[in-house]
Amino acid sequence: MIKFQALMQAVHQSIHGAAQAVEQSGTKHINKFFDRIEKEGNTEKEKLKEQLSEAINNGDRALANELVAQLDNFEDDDDLLAEGEATYRPKMVAMAFPSQGPDGVDSTIVNVPLITLCPISSPRIKDVKFSADLEVTADNTEDLFVAFRAPQVSGGDNTVTKDTTNTHIEICLVGHEPPEGLQKVIEGYEKALRAQIPG
């Protein structure tokens, strides 16, 4: 037997974990359709950290203090660092488009952002249904305890078979429109792409 509250907490945590896993799948679009380009400032900071580590290992206090002061000049705010650390460049595919020129049909090579060619859907959990046949009891402190239905005894040979149908979980995933920010990014690339395509 377990406390009813503990059962509800376990169910809630499982649903919350599933929802987080679905949400994290949305950020995969960044790695799938964009290349991360590190900025020079970030590599500069990494060099300073390496020099600081060497100075500490060599016991050079003056140099270590100087390097710490230089590192303090970098932004410490996590949001600003995340924003300025790197640039994301769209992954491209080169496509040849036919165009009519003075000498006949020519081919114009256009770099097409991969994100404009792929359908994007963000799944989300619509609802979760959990049903179970439980035995409910209370103790002296009025805490509720629950137990799953006991195994069923079959026929005359006294063989015990577990009833595996006493719990039913149903999770409904539905396709969802991509976030508005991602839609705007795709629209921007599509406009730039239309300007490149001849005709």
Image (cartoon, rainbow, N blue to C red):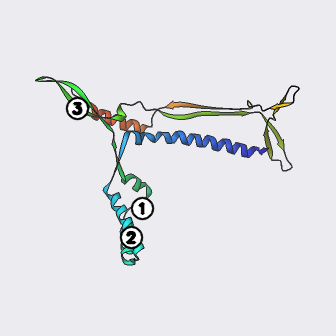
Q: Is residue 131 left or right of residue 75?
A: right
Real-space CA distance between mark 3 and mark 1, rounded to the nearest whole angstrom = 44 Å
Mark 2 packing: few (<14 Cα in 10 Å), some, or many (20+)?
some
Q: Position of residue 29 (x, y in %)?
A: 42, 39
Q: Residue at x 77, y 45 (%)?
A: 2
Which numbered disc flags the more N-terminal residue, 2 or 1? 2
Residue type for callout 1:
Asp
Q: Residue at x 37, y 78 (%)?
A: 62
The answer to which of 150 and 16 lies nearer the viewer is 150
Residue bearing mark 1 = 76
29, above or below 76, in the image: above
The answer to which of 40 and 155 lies nearer the viewer is 155
Q: Secondary structure at mark 3?
A: strand
Which numbered disc flags the more N-terminal residue, 3 or 1? 1
Q: Nearer the viewer, mark 2 or mark 1?
A: 2
Q: Are marks 3 and 2 in contact (CB under 8 Å)?
A: no
Q: Secondary structure at mark 2?
A: helix
Q: Is residue 136 left or right of residue 169?
A: right
Residue 65 showing in the rendered view: yes
Residue bearing mark 3 = 109
Real-space CA distance between mark 3 and mark 2, rounded to the nearest whole angstrom = 50 Å
Mark 1 packing: few (<14 Cα in 10 Å), some, or many (20+)?
few
Q: Is residue 198 left or right of residue 137?
A: left
Picture disc at residue 54 = 2
Residue 199 showing in the rendered view: no
Which numbered disc flags the more N-terminal residue, 3 or 2? 2
Q: Nearer the viewer, mark 3 or mark 1?
A: 3
